[in-house]
Every structure is written in structure tokens, then in C-alpha cells.
Amino acid sequence: MSSIESSLVEYVSGNLLEGSVEGLDADTPLLELNILDSVEVLTIVQFMQSEFGVAVPVGRVVPENFGSVRAMCGLVAELKQEANGV
Amino acid sequence: MTGIVSGLHREVVELSAPEAGVSGSIALAGETPCSYGELWSRVEAVAGALADAGAGPGERVAIWLPKGADYVAAILATLRLGGCYVPLDAAQPAARAHVVLNDADPAVLVTSSDLVAGFAADELPRIVDPAGLQARNVPASPGNPTPEDDAALLYTSGSTGKPKGVRLTHRNVAAFVRWCLEDFPTSDEDLVVNHAPFTFDISLHGLFVPLAVGASLLVLSDEDRTNPKAMAAAIERERPTMWYSVPFALDLIVREVPDALGPDTSLRTVLYAGEEYPSARLAELSRRLPAETVIGNLYGPTETNVCIAHVVDRDELDGTTPVPLGSPVAGAEISLIDDDGARITEAGDLGEIVVTGSCVSPGYRGRDPRPAIDDRGTRQYHTGDLGFYDERGRLCFQGRADRQVKLGGYRVELGEVEAALAQLPGVHEVAVERVVTQERAQLVAFLTADEPAPGLIDVKQHCARLVPRYMIPHRVRKLDSMPRNANGKVDHGRLAELYAETEGE
């Protein structure tokens, strides 16, 4: 598990699931299971900024990028790559 | 100027081709605008396909599509043929759609192939896919509905754990639209936001009101309607003049987008309904709107649509006093009834809100209809909501008499969630409560179960197959025994205390 993945799993379990990790993995569908809603997505965006140093543009705050921890890792990786490329 | 919805004064909703003057006007605003003429071509194309598939006067047509132009066209095409539309929400799980389809028994289902991929063909009615329908030269033959014919069948969360289909007649819909036009005047200059899912009675406003007067409507997509930044961006870009939604959606914009709205916003009428607007939050909304913008508090369960309305006195908003429900709308009579069935007139006395008039639905599909006539010649609905009159004679809301709660604007019958949980293997007893912590309402499931008891994710995965997303519990508490009161009933107050004691553990 990458460090980004484990930080995000830890964030989700600690902040949204009262510390429960049983059954939670990178592919757990967070939106479909009502674990994440539109308010919490915004707090995750802030967490990504403070933890990984990536600013998430409004246009990227879409369900496909926040549906699971794996999707969020993909987004962080993309944003880092884009930042380095400039 | 008139639009394509008429017949309202005869208490019916009729669809007719746009006149030359309105044909070029924008009907559907947004990134791909659609004129009245173009919308009408779509309506005729869908109506033709529906008629070929067997839909017609008095038939039900289910619609299961993402929110957008095709959905609007399918609703209008159904009414054009004199049929009754049964809306399904593409954002809800297939199992819920299945239950509704079984109960509604529609002649035709308007949907797309990807949504019904998980269904066996023999489980479904005949399907019309609006993608790729050809324009028709032969106009659909219009149905001739009477005021008592069903126009829509809206499924709400049922107390027995099964959704109930609320029948809305042409009279119900026409009364609502006429009242809206009188109290919150709308012209062909207006752009009206359609925020709610089409399964929700709030959506009727942003559909029939603009289409009756040749105004434009802005249909927010399933994704945008829950995304504060997308909503704020749509307001900025499209400059709508009217908004009607649950308080939750407005507050999401106010809380999450600091520069949204403001003194230059285009909104001149902002209406809300569906749940109470927390006083402090409403005061904040008011500060973010121009002084001349009208804020309206509308009240009514799906069974009556809006029956009480109140134009908020913005100078009166102090951040703590609740806003009154207000006065009955045209065509509705309201009474407050005490436990003995006597009518309350004194200020301050608590009673159940009872609605009488042309806004009242004849009842639920598959159940005995409400009597068409009582001693005053109209239908009555006992809302199960409690209220009282304030010193100025205005009706004020006090809460639900039973266990139907609101969560994020959605109506949730706690019993329906409990029924879903009770199906989990190894679970003995369940109770679900709505608990508010840190200003947020959450669903907490309490259960007694064999060891090892199911974990939170197990519970969520199980519920996701049976109920809409907004009904999936946020928290689970495993108990050794269910607290019960002296009558042997689950002690709901005690459950809330138990949760407060263990919160954050």
C-alpha cells in the first residue's frame, strides 16, 4: 500500500467511520455506501492540500475522482505529475 | 405570452404545440439550450414512440433516466397522450426501481439500456429509449384528461418498509401551478431553476410553472444538484430569477461557496420547502440576497403538495425564532385538530395539521382511495405533523407526530431502513434513529445480533442493495438488548441517549 493510500484509508476510517477499518479498502465505494457526501468531499479536498500539497481544481471535484480511495490516489498522482510538468 | 402547458383554469394539465411567438424562445437553458420549438419536436417524437409501445390515456409511463432534457420530454410526452408519469431517480439503486416498477405496473418504461442492464427482460415493461428517436411528422393524438385523472404517481418512503405511490390528479397539479402563478408571479422573462429530482413534488414547480407562461427552466443534473460549487456556478452563469429547493441545498451553497449569491445575484424569488430551515442559517441566506428578493417558506407533504405558504418577513429574522408556516394557499383549507378531534382556534395549543381542498391527493396506488366527498364536499388529509397558531394567528410547525424524518431534504421513514436491516443474517432486533450531532443529522442503526455482529461497512453494503443512498445508516451501535418502555415499545429517547454516550468511540 502506498503512503498516500494508507493516509487516505486512515483519514476515511478515522473521520467518517469512527475508526472502523474492518471491510474498508482502497476499492470500497465511498459514495454509494453513503460514507462520503458533498460536504465531506470538500474536507477531503482540504486534507489533500495540507497532507499532499496538491490543490484540487473545482472541475476535478467530481464523483469519479472521489468514489474510492484508489480514485483519490489517482487524482493526487495526476495533480502531482501536472504540477511537476509545469 | 403562453407556453405549452394549458388547461389549468379547467383543472387539467394539457400540452399543446408552442405558438409562433414562443417557438424560438429558450425552453431549457443551460450548456446546450433548447428552444420551445425544439423541445416540442422531442416531445412529439417521444409521444409517438410511447403510443407505438402501447401508452395512451389513463396508462402509466415510468421514466428512469438521468435528470435532463430527455427526462423533461418524457414527462411532457406522457401527459400529451393523457397518461400518468411515474418518475424514477437514476441516482437510486436498481432494487428500489424494481420495487417501484412492480407496484406501479406501467405500460411503458422510458429508460436507457445501461440503466436496465441488470434486469431480466421479462421483469420489465416495454421500453422506449429516447436516444436516437426520429422526429415525427404525424403529431401525437392528444389525450383529453378530466380533473380526476391521475397525472403523476410519486413514490415516497412507506411506513411498512415499502414505498407508497402518491397519486396526483390533474386537479392537484393544476391547482398547484395556478396558485404558484398567483402568489409568486412568473412571466416569459423568468428563468426558473428545477433543482429537485423529478421523484420529488418540489420538481413540479420548476417544470409546469415556466412551461405555462413561456419562461425558461434550468434543469440541474443529478451531479450538479448536490454539488455546491456547481450550483453556485450555474447561478452565476445562467442568471436564473427563481429558485425552489429544500433548505439543505440552499444552505450548502451559502456554507461552501463564500462568494456565491450576494447583492448582485439574479435571483428575485427564492422558495424552500421539505423541512424546516434552521433559523440561524435562514438569517445567513437572507444576508446573502438582495433586499428586494422574496423568500417564501412553503409547506405540504406530497399528499397535498404545497398547502400553506409564507412570505418571509426578512426584517423579522433574528436567527433564533422559527419562521411560521403561514396561511393556506388558494384552494386549501387548514385546520388544527386536537386528540379528541376538536378544532383548535386558541393560540399556542398544539394539534395535528389537517388539510382539505383541491390540493389533496386521492390517495395511494393500490389502496382504497380517499372518499371524494366529505361533509364539505372535498378531500381531507391528516398530515401527522403537529402545529400551533402564534399570537398573530399564523400556523407554526412543531414536528412529526410519527417517525417519519427528513434527512438532507429527503423524507425517510425510519421503519423502511429498519425493515432493510432486519434482513441482515444474524440480526435479531433493529431500531434506526435520526441523531443530530455537530449540527449534522445522521442515521444511526442500533442492533442486537449473533456474534460476530456485522460491522459498519457490512451494514452499509447490505443497505445499499435495498434502499436509496440517503437512507444508508452512517453509524452502527451493537447492543446487548434493545431498550424498551413500559408498554414494550422500543424506547427511542433512550436510544438517542445511548448514542450520545458512545459517540466518537
Image: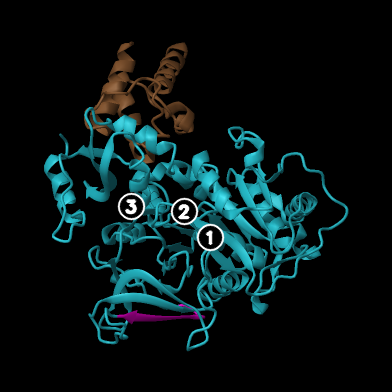
Task: Give the letter of the chain under mark 1.
Answer: B
- Mark 1, residue position: B241
Direction right: furthest residue: B137
Mark 3 or 2, nearer chain start = 2
Amino acid type of the residue that numbered disc 2 sits on in the rendered structure:
Pro
Q: Determine whether the residue tagged by mark 1 lies in a helix, strand or loop.
A: loop
Q: Which mark is residue A3?
A: none
Q: From the viewer's perspective, is residue A55 above or below residue B244?
A: above
Give how far apart the Cα atoms at labels 1 and 3 are. Answer: 36 Å
Position of the N terminus of chain B by quadrant: bottom right
Q: Nearer the viewer, residue B435 or B98?
A: B98
**Residue B384 at x, y = what percent?**
35, 69
Amino acid type of the residue that numbered disc 1 sits on in the rendered structure:
Thr
Q: From the viewer's perspective, is residue B113 above or below residue B7?
A: above
**Mark 3 and mark 2 residues within 8 Å of each other at the beta carbon:** no
Q: Report the span colored magenta.
A: B329-337
- Mark 3, residue position: B414
Q: Magenta region's main secondary structure? A: strand
- Mark 2, residue position: B163
Mark 1 or 2, nearer chain start = 2
What colour is chain A? Answer: brown
